[in-house]
Image: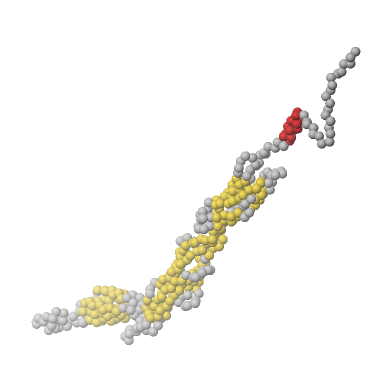
Amino acid sequence: MPRTHAAARPRAPAVGRGSRVALPVLALQAVTSTSASAVDVRPQDQAPLSVAVTATGSVERAYAWSIEKAADAAVRSTDSTNTATFRYTVTARAGAMTESGWALAGALTVTNPNDGEGGAITADAGVVTTLGGGSSCTVVGGDDLVVPAAGQLTLPYTCTFASAPSGSGTVDATVSWDPAGEASSASAVGSAPGSFTAASETNQTVAVVDDRTVAGQRVVLDPSVTWSTGLVRTYTYDLALVGSAPGTCRAYSNTATLDQPSGADPTAVTTVQACAPEVLPAQAFGQATGSVKAGCQGTVRTRVSNRTAETVTYRLRVGNKVHRIAVRSLGHRKFVTSGRALAKVTLKVGSTRLDRIRIPQRCEAPMVLPDTGLRAASS
């Protein structure tokens, strides 16, 4: 009987040195799927940075002053002691207050709340102010600063001003960075009030001094005057000045000074003259003199001379009539009045009697009346 043969099994190909073996397609797809699942990392949420800022402003202040001086008279006659007394008034005034050298400084602190590996953030920081005055602020190390994870970074800053800023405002610090995720940028702002305090004050307090007509002499009228808006201080004193030879005047210059700690001292000068009157032979120096004469027609003639330093009022009594005659210092005056025959005539200054007479009896009428030029009628 013929032998039946079974179906032949396919033989595995021989694997020789340098031969390549093709893997099943199903196995290749499985390897690819497992590799993709291992590297899939999504962006994590990142907390923002925060920034705080401090600010201290300074300014230099200078205070202006002025001074005035006046006397109650430019010329005055000396008295019986050959002195004349003048009253001087010194006035100190506060002027303008000026400011310069404005400056602002402080520090900004950036805080990073993110911790863990890769939590450090690179950022930029800047400072601006609303104080105006052409301000320009610079942060030291403000570019590409690295804020450590769960840490802080503090940077100093300074601001300068081209002109006078406002008295108050704000200082604003800004920090910006490139955050994780889809956003292209992020920023945080911190603010602090900004103002200026005086770093130096020039001539805030001064002294008021006077030489009282003696050059180089220092008489302190006020040792300490402190500047304030609209301040006016007045000082008054009397000074007796000696005259010169009779009929001449002596000039005196009197200087007041504001003694400042810095710079030129403001001064004010006033000049007066003490004049000694010329002494007449019939009149004693420093006295008020006078005399009266009367004619038989009842005319009373008075001559007065005031040699004192003040105005004098003479009192002339003619019978029951009283006349008051005012004569200024170093003045002379004639006064004419009339009275009845035999009337008493008295001239006084205060309680001092200068002269006393009596009007004589009426005289006979002259051939020609003196006042009219007419002839008198015969009896």
Looking at this rendering, what residue extends furthest in the top direction?
1
Residue at 21 percent across and 77 percent down: it is 338
Looking at this rendering, what residue extends furthest in the bottom direction?
281
Q: Nearer the viewer, residue 373 or 116?
A: 116
Pinpoint residue 31: horizontal percent, then vertical percent: 75, 32
Relative horizontal placement of residue 40, taking residue 219 as reference (left or right): right
Looking at this rendering, what residue extends furthest in the front direction?
2
Residue at 67 percent across and 39 percent down: it is 44
Asked whether residue 221 appears in the rendered view, the answer is: no
Q: Quadrant of the N terminus?
A: top right
Pinpoint residue 97: horizontal percent, then vertical percent: 49, 61
Residue at 62 percent across and 44 percent down: it is 178
Residue at 53 percent across and 51 percent down: it is 130
193 shown above or below 47: below
Q: Nearer the viewer, residue 320 or 73?
A: 73
Asked whether residue 177 appears in the rendered view, the answer is: yes
Residue 379 lies in what quarter of the image? bottom left
Pinpoint residue 175: horizontal percent, then vertical percent: 61, 48
Q: Nearer the viewer, residue 270 or 130?
A: 130
